[in-house]
Amino acid sequence: MAQPSLTRIAYQTLQQGKGLVGLAHKGISTKLMELLIPEAIPETSPITTDLLLELRDSAKSLEEIDWLEAERGLYPKNLLFDVPWIEWFFKYPLVWLDMPSTWKRRKKKHFQDLPKTINKENYPDYYLQNFHHQTDGYLSDHSAELYDMQVEILFNGTADAMRRRVISPLKEGLELGFSSNNFANYKVLDIATGTGRTLKQIRSAIPEIELVGLDLSTSYLKQASKYLNNYQKSELVQLVKGNAERMPLLDNSFHAITCVFLFHELPSKARQNVLKECFRVLKPNGSLILADSIQINDSPQFTQVMENFYRIFHEPYYRNYIKDDINLRLTDSGFVSIKANSFFMTRIWSATKPS
Ligand SMILES: C[S@@+](CC[C@H](N)C(=O)[O-])C[C@H]1O[C@@H](n2cnc3c(N)ncnc32)[C@H](O)[C@@H]1O
C-alpha cells in the first residue's frame, strides 16, 4: 500500500488539531457556563458513544474527499492549509471576552439585541436577530471580525472543507452548461457571501473567473473585501449589498450561483423567494449550487445533533429547515437536473436552469 505523502500527513494533523481546539473550546466554555450561569444551560439530548463514533467517521470521510479532490486538481493543495493563524491568534481572546454577553442574552432570551445605530427599515424582519446569540447579529464590524473563527470552532475545524464541496459541482455545471474552454468568460455569484470564505476558495480553484458576492450586511462585506481584494495579482471581486430575495442584478446574467449556509437562517417563504431570484438571475443552462445543513431525511442518524443545534443556539428557522423539501422547492422554482449529496454536517444541492 502506498505511504501517505508528507503533505497529506500535515493536512490530517492540521484537521486533528483544529478538531481538538474546537472540542476543547466548547468543553471549557460549557463548564464555565455551568459554573457561572447555570440557568443559561439549554436542555439537550445526550450524545451516545455510538453517535460520537459515527460523527467522527463522517468527519473523516469529509477529510478524505477534501484531500482527494485537491489531489485530482480541483483546487490547489495549499487551500487545505488556508488558515489565518496569526490573525486568529490575536482575535481569539475577543471570543472569550464576548462570551459573558452571549450567555446573558441566552439567559434573558434577548434575541433582538442589535446595535442602536442600524436602520431597521433596511432589513427584513427575520434578519433582525442575534443568530447563534452572536453579539450584534450580523450587523457590526465586531461580529464580522469574529465570525470565521466562531464557525470554525463550531464545526471543529471542518467549515472550509464543507464549503469546498461546492467547487466540484460548480466546475461540472460550468463545463456541462457552456461551451467556452476559458473560465475567464464565466461569471459566478455567491449569495449570502458573508466574509467571503467561499469566494476565496472559488478564486483559488478558478483564478481567472469573474466573481461577485452579495450579502445584506455592510460589515460582513467590508470584511470580505479585506480578505479578497488585497491580492494585486487577481481580479477585483465585486461585492454588492442586497437582499437575496430581490437582488439588484440583471436577468440571465450569471453562469452559476453558489449559496453557502443561508437557507437554515431563512423562514420558508424567503427560501422560496431566494430560489426564484436565483432562477431569474441565472443564464439558461446556468447552475445553482446550494450548501446548507444536512436534514432529517438524508441524515436521520444525526437527528439528535440537529435537534441539539437549535436548542443550544438561537436558530429560529432551523427546526423548520431540517424538514423542508428543498428538492421540491427547486422544482417549483423551475430548476431541473437536481442532485444532492451529504458531507458530514453539510448537504450540497446542484440544479440547472433549463435552456
Ligand atoms: C450563516 S452566514 C453564512 C455566510 C457565508 N456564506 C459562510 O459560508 O460563512 C449567513 C449570511 O447570510 C446573510 N444573509 C441573511 N439573510 C440574507 C438575505 N436575505 N439576503 C442576503 N444575505 C443574507 C447574512 O448577512 C450572513 O452573512
Image (cartoon, helix red, strand yellow):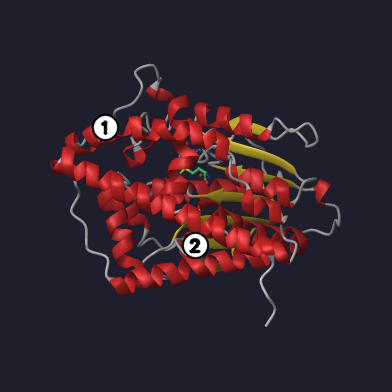
The total number of labels drawn is 2
Residue 146 quadrant: top left
Are discs 2 and 1 less than 8 Å apart at CB? no
In the picture provided, is 79 more to the left or to the right than 42? right
Q: Which residue is located at x 32 percent, y 75 percent?
A: 50
In this rendering, the label closer to the viewer, 2 or 1: 1
Can residue 276 be seen here? yes
Q: Position of residue 171 (x, y in %)?
A: 72, 59
Residue 131 quadrant: top left
In the image, which disc is placed on residue 347? Answer: 2
Q: Position of residue 119 (x, y in %)?
A: 40, 20
Residue under numbered circle 1: 100
Viewer-side residue, 197 vs 192: 197
Determine whether the residue tagged by mark 2 lies in a helix, strand or loop: strand
Residue farthest bottom in this picture = 1
Q: Position of residue 324 (x, y in %)?
A: 38, 60
Amino acid bearing label 2: Arg
In the image, which disc is placed on residue 315? Answer: none
In the picture provided, is 189 more to the left or to the right than 128? right
